[in-house]
């Protein structure tokens, strides 16, 4: 089931009480590309990142493109495109890409794992991040979209750090 991007945006912010902001026109940035193989899996297969960077919180990520623009601070607003999938089976549950509209929000207003995944990116970067449930929605989930204890995978493009 694919859920409209606005629903996930609302769910990303629900845990912290913040909501999406209006999206300004993105500023094009140049990016140095560093191609890293991220496996493409058929629906139904669990997602496993190859050679990920793993942080102390358990977040795993692989950079597909390392950006060259600004890097956000913990309280900055960012404009991103994302696709969210369940790690257990690769099923897409939301995508701003499919919706055709990037989302703008404050990093301190989203689930911890999503904020952490974006916080070390630079504008123009693209990353695949596996967010364990403990830094996602945890045992409560976000019914009916995110079940309890679900590990999530996000493909993220940091378009702009909004000033």
Image: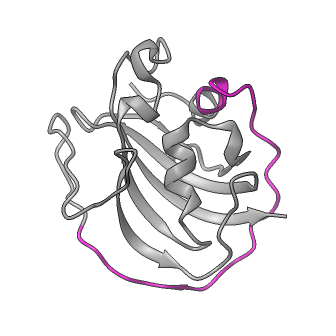
**Quarter of the picture holding the N terminus:** top left
Q: Quadrant of residue 105?
A: top right
Task: Residue 44 in the image: state x and y as whole percent.
Answer: 16, 34
Most common secondary structure along the magenta stretch: loop
The residue sitting at 37% across, 82% down in the picture is: 34
Q: Is residue 148 above or below residue 115?
A: above
Is the residue 80 above or below the residue 27 in the image?
above
Q: Which residues are magenta?
A: 10-37
Whether residue 11 is visible here, answered yes or no, is yes
Whether residue 149 is situated above or below residue 122 in the rendered picture: above
The structure residue drawn at horizontal position 54% and vertical position 64%, both measured from the top left corner, is 120
Closer to the camera, 152 or 40? 152
Q: Using the rendered image of the protein, determine whether residue 97 is visible from the camera's viewpoint.
A: no
Q: Residue 93, located in which quarter of the rendered image?
A: top left
- Whether 153 is among the magenta residues is no
Q: Residue furthest front?
A: 56
What residue appears at the point 70 percent right and 56 percent down from the top-left corner?
78
Quarter containing the C terminus: bottom right
- Identify the image's colour scheme: rainbow, by chain, secondary structure or one colour: one colour
Rendering quarter of residue 4: top right
Say whether residue 150 is left or right of residue 122.
left
**Badge count:** 0
Q: Residue at x 56, y 35 (%)?
A: 111
């Amino acid at each position: 089931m694919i859920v409209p991007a606005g629903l996930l945006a609302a769910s990303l912010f629900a845990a912290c009480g913040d909501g999406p902001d209006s999206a300004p026109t993105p500023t094009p940035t140049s990016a140095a590309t560093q191609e890293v193989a991220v496996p493409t899996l058929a629906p139904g297969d669990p997602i496993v990142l190859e050679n990920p960077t793993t942080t102390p919180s358990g977040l795993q990520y692989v950079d597909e493109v390392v950006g060259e623009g600004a890097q956000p601070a913990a309280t900055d607003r960012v404009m991103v495109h994302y696709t969210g999938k369940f790690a257990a089976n690769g099923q897409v549950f939301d995508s701003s890409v499919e919706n055709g509209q990037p989302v703008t929000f404050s990093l301190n207003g989203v689930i911890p794992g999503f904020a952490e995944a974006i916080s070390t990116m630079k504008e123009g970067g693209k990353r695949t991040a596996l967010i364990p449930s403990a830094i996602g929605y945890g045992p409560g989930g976000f019914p009916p979209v995110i079940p309890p204890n679900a590990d999530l995978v996000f493909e993220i493009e940091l378009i702009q750090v909004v000033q």
